[in-house]
Image (cartoon, rainbow, N blue to C red):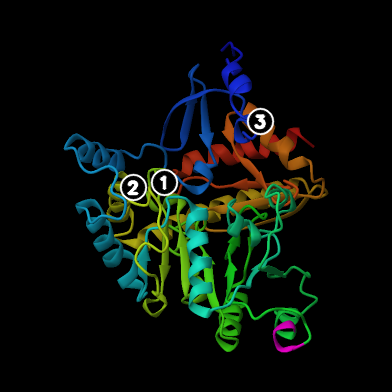
Amino acid sequence: MTITQPDLSVFETLESEVRSYCRGWPTVFDRARGSRMYDEDGHAYLDFFAGAGSLNYGHNNPVLKGALIDYLERDGVTHGLDMSTTAKRAFLQTFQDLVLRPRDLPYKVMFPGPTGTNAVESALKLARKVKGREAIVSFTNAFHGMSLGSLAVTGNAFKRAGAGIPLVHGTPMPFDNYFDGTVPDFLWFERLLEDQGSGLNKPAAVIVETVQGEGGINVARPEWLRALKELCERQDMLLIVDDIQMGCGRTGAFFSFEEAGITPDIVTVSKSISGYGLPMSLCLFKPELDVWEPGEHNGTFRGNNPAFVTATAALETYWTDGSAMEKQTRARGEQVERALVSITEENLADVREYRGRGLVWGLEFHDKSRASRVARRAFELGLLIETSGPEGEVVKLLPALTITREELDEGLSVLARAVRETA
C-alpha cells in the first residue's frame, strides 16, 4: 500500500504550538471503533492509549452510542447547568445502586466542571474549607492537572514551570519506594508533622494517586496506602485519592483504592466515568464534609447531560456484574505482564523495569530517550502508545478494558518488535 503524506498544513499554521500528541502521531485520524483508529487514508492503528484513559470501553462503543443517539433523537436536555434532569437522576441512581452501595461507600456526589482538574480543584477547596487550613501534601512525581491549584500539587518541573507564577500551599513528600526501600515509610513526613520547628504548616489534606500514571506508572503498595490512611487519621488530615485515570476499572476494581481496603475522605473521578469520551467529572466525599454553600463552586458545563446518559449505559453494561469486569481486566493485565517479562528477558541490558496493575503498565529503559523511539517505531508499525515519567522514559500501555485477547496479543507483538528494532 502506498502511504501518502497527510495534509497537516492547517494544524501547523493555525493551531498553537502547544499541541502535543499529534507530533508523535503525524497523521489525520478520521474514525474509530473499539480498539482501532483509522486515518483519512484508511490506515488502521491499534490503540493502546484509549484517550489517555478516557475510553476504557473503547471508541464508539455501540451500546453507549445507541443510548446517546436515542437521547439526542428525542431532544433530551443537552446543557443543564446543575438543574435536575431525568438524565442526571438516572445516573445518580445507577451510580448509587451499582457502585456506591455494593462497596458500602457513603459518598455524596458533586458535579464540578467537566474535566479532571476541575474535580481536583473542588477537592482541594473543600478540604481547605473543612479543615480551615491552607497546606496540602502531595507526592513526588504526582500529576493532578494543569490549572493552578492542581499544578501546585503536581511534581513535574516542566508542567509546573508553565504556571508563570509561584505555586504555593503544596508540599511534596516521597511516594512509595522513592528511596528504593532504604527508608521506612513516612519517616520524613511524620517527623515533620510532629516537629514544631520543621516549618511545615499543618496540612488540611493529603492527595495521592494509587498508581501514578503521568509520573511513570509508579504503583503504591496496598500496605503503604493503608499506612497513609492511618497517618491521616492520626494527624487530623483528610485523604484525597485522585482516581481520575486509575478509576472506572482501570486497575481491576471500579476504584483503584479498593485493593488496599481503605475509604478515602474525598475521591476525584473523571476520564472514563462518561464511558464515551464525553467530558464529565465527579468529586465524591463523605457526607459530613458537605459544607458547601449553594453555588460556592460551580461551572457552566457541570451539567453535561449526554455524558450522564453514556455514563449510565456504561455502568449498566459493565458494572451490573462488577466481578466479571474485574476478572477480565486482571486476566488481560496478566497477559500484558507475560509479554513484558518476555521483552525484558530478551533485552536484559536495556530494560530497567516493568510495572503496573490491571490494564495500566509501564516499561522503563536505562536509556531515557529509548521510550520515545519505541513509541515512534510502534506508530510506524500501526500501534498507538505514549510515554510517561518526568523525562518521558517510560513506555505507557493503556489499552481499552474491552480489548480482545487477540488484539492485545497483536499490539504486544508490535511493541516487542518496536523494542527490538530500536535497540
Q: Amino acid at mark 2?
A: Asn
> What quarter of the picture does the N terminus occupy?
top right
Q: Which residue is mark 1?
A: 279
Could you tell me residue 221's position as x and y percent? 61, 71
Could you tell me residue 192's position as x and y percent? 74, 82
Q: Which residue is mark 2?
A: 304
Q: Is residue 189 above or below residue 155?
A: below
Q: Is residue 289 above or below residue 9?
A: below
C-beta proximity under 8 Å, tags 1 and 3 = no
**Camera-side residue: 102 or 120?**
120
Name the secondary structure under disc 3. loop
The mark that comes first in sequence, 2 or 3, is 3
C-beta proximity under 8 Å, tags 1 and 2 = yes
Q: CA distance from mark 2 to mark 3?
A: 29 Å
User: What residue lies at 23% left-to-right and 37% top-to-bottom?
Assistant: 72
C-beta proximity under 8 Å, tags 2 and 3 = no
| The stretch drawn in magenta includes residue 404 | no
User: What residue lies at 33% left-to-right and 59% top-to-bottom?
Assistant: 319
Decide whether the magenta segment is chiefly helix, strand or loop: helix
Q: CA distance from mark 1 to mark 2?
A: 7 Å
Name the secondary structure under disc 2. loop
Could you tell me residue 120's position as x and y percent? 52, 60
**Camera-side residue: 383 or 390?**
390
Please state the extent of the stretch shown in magenta in the rendering: 192-196
**Camera-side residue: 16 or 218?**
16
Disc assigned to residue 17: 3
Q: Amino acid at mark 1?
A: Pro
| The stretch drawn in magenta includes residue 195 | yes
Disc assigned to residue 416: none
> What quarter of the picture does the C terminus occupy?
top right
Q: Quadrant of residue 169?
A: bottom right
